[in-house]
Image (tube, rainbow, N blue to C red):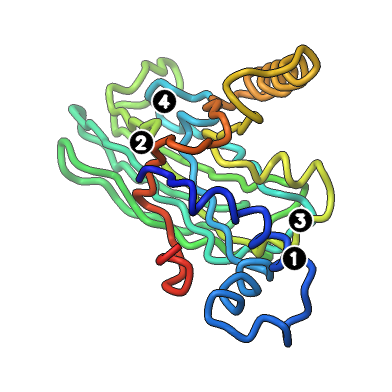
Amino acid sequence: MRLPHRLLRPLPLVLGVGLLAPVAALASPAGDALQRLQGETWVTRSFTLADLGITRTVLLTGFDAKQEFYLPVPRRVTIADAGIDFRGRYYKPEEARTSMTLAVNGRPGYAARVDTAEGDASQTLKVDTRTIVDGFLRLGVSWINNSPERICAYERPSGNVLAVEPDTRFTYRFTSGALTDLADAWVALPARPTMIVAGKRLSKGAYDSAWRIGLAMEQAGRQINVRSFPAVGDSVDTQGWQIPPALAGL
């Protein structure tokens, strides 16, 4: 969408009215839509193990293999609708009584016996948000093989493998008004945040500030996109935006 003069020039005035004027003074559909945008809105966050730096498949082998993944969440923000889309695949060339268990914060969420030689281990888990403590959600994966050939004198490695894929995804929601400090806001950033700078040409001080923020995000494992604030004549991709109908005409 190309931004015309008629849209950009009145924008500061429209935003100023929406922020400062009382509700009674905004007796219009556009004013009501601005008021709702200023209020608490639900924010969805979704990220994968790859977004956390686990970019390679994690292989669980042996007779009793366990792995825990720590998924960060804001400490002082109540989250809702949390879930884990576990992605994995198993390979079982050897005979054994094999089972897989998935646990969330120490509580089993899924358990099943594995009988076939190969298959999809993907599962969708609901998260009881009341069990989240210390700013992390723990996803525990257990892969157990009880082979009849296993004896005390000789413990050979098992050829049965559970592969945990990097596209395993964790999703949750929270209200925007619940963020009250910088630490929680930092954790609640999307996996690939966008940093908006004032324009294509920056002063030395503005450039230095943007560079420091970008460096801090990169060191924290965030892959950021840098965009300049749109100017008259610029084109903006609005695909995926959720725009209230009362504001869509603007």
Give the spatial CA distance, label 2 vs label 4.
17 Å
Q: Which residue is mark 2?
A: 145
Mark 3, other Cα within 10 Å: few <14 / some 14–19 / many ≥20: some
- The amino acid type of the residue labelled 2 equals Asn
Apparent side of residue 142 relative to residue 100 in the rendered image (left or right)? right
- Nearer to us in this view, 237 or 14: 14
- Nearer to us in this view, 171 or 36: 36
Residue at the far left: name it. 117
Q: Of label 3 and label 2, which has the lower sequence position?
A: 2
- Image x and y of residue 58, in percent: 41, 25
Q: Which residue is mark 3?
A: 179
- Image x and y of residue 100, in percent: 37, 45
Mark 1, other Cα within 10 Å: few <14 / some 14–19 / many ≥20: few
Q: Is residue 152 positioned above or below 14 on the image?
A: above
Secondary-structure class at tag 4: strand
Q: Which residue is mark 4?
A: 58
Q: Is residue 138 positioned above or below 40 on the image?
A: above
Give the spatial CA distance, label 3 vs label 2.
45 Å
Secondary-structure class at tag 1: helix
Mark 4, other Cα within 10 Å: few <14 / some 14–19 / many ≥20: some
Viewport quadrant of the N terminus: top left
Give the spatial CA distance, label 1 vs label 4.
49 Å
- The amino acid type of the residue labelled 1 equals Leu
Viewport quadrant of the C terminus: bottom left
What number is the disc on residue 168?
none
Mark 3 or 2, which is nearer the eye?
A: 3
What number is the disc on residue 19?
1
Apparent side of residue 107 relative to residue 25 in the rendered image (left or right)? left
- Image x and y of residue 226, in percent: 55, 26
Secondary-structure class at tag 2: strand
- The amino acid type of the residue labelled 4 equals Val
